Image (tube, grey):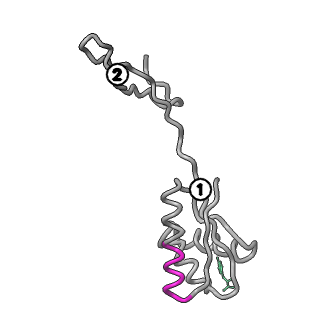
Amino acid sequence: MPDDPIKPPAVPSVLPRPDDGQGAVVAERKTAKVEPPRLFQVVMLNDDYTPMEFVVMVLQEYFQRDIETATQIMLKIHHEGKGVCGVYTKDVAATKVELVLAAAKRSGHPLQCTMEAA
Ligand code: TYC
């Protein structure tokens, strides 16, 4: 039967069983359940001091946004108080938050950025 395009393929995993006393180790096939990874939004917060150009640069550099999209996101944050820079798996989102905070600190800006479950 062809693979179902929606369901992830059933990946058989071979689990060792304790010796059955017959002098042989029997391997048993089980179907591994694969859940999609949980996703996290990287959220940037507005402040009164970080230059708009710096925020646009951060969105281009760390979130691969083109200049038009980066400017739109920056303006949304500026007007609404916060905005989503992107949605990622947990480790990637955490790394992006660290990189943004480090870049802001290096440049002496108070820019804040957090992650939240999507
Ligand atoms: N409010 C800032 C200003 O007027 C610009 C800004 C936008 C700062 C987005 C932070 O996440 C931010 N210079």
How far across and how far down the image is residue 100, in percent?
52, 74
Quadrant, the N terminus: top left
Query: What residue does disc 1 label?
Result: 40
Label 2 vs label 1, nearer the camera: 2
Residue sitting at x 52%, y 69% = 66
Spatial CA span between label 2 and label 1: 40 Å
Question: Would residue 104 be found to the left or right of residue 76 on screen?
Answer: left
Query: What residue does disc 2 label?
Result: 18
Start-end of magenta stretch: 99-108
From the viewer's side, name the closer residue of 11 and 5.
11
Q: Secondary structure at mark 1?
A: strand
How far across and how far down the image is residue 18, in percent?
34, 21
User: For the view shown, which residue lies furthest in the front direction?
Assistant: 21
Residue sitting at x 48%, y 31% = 8
Report the image quarter containing ligand 1. bottom right
How far across and how far down the image is residue 81, in percent?
73, 73
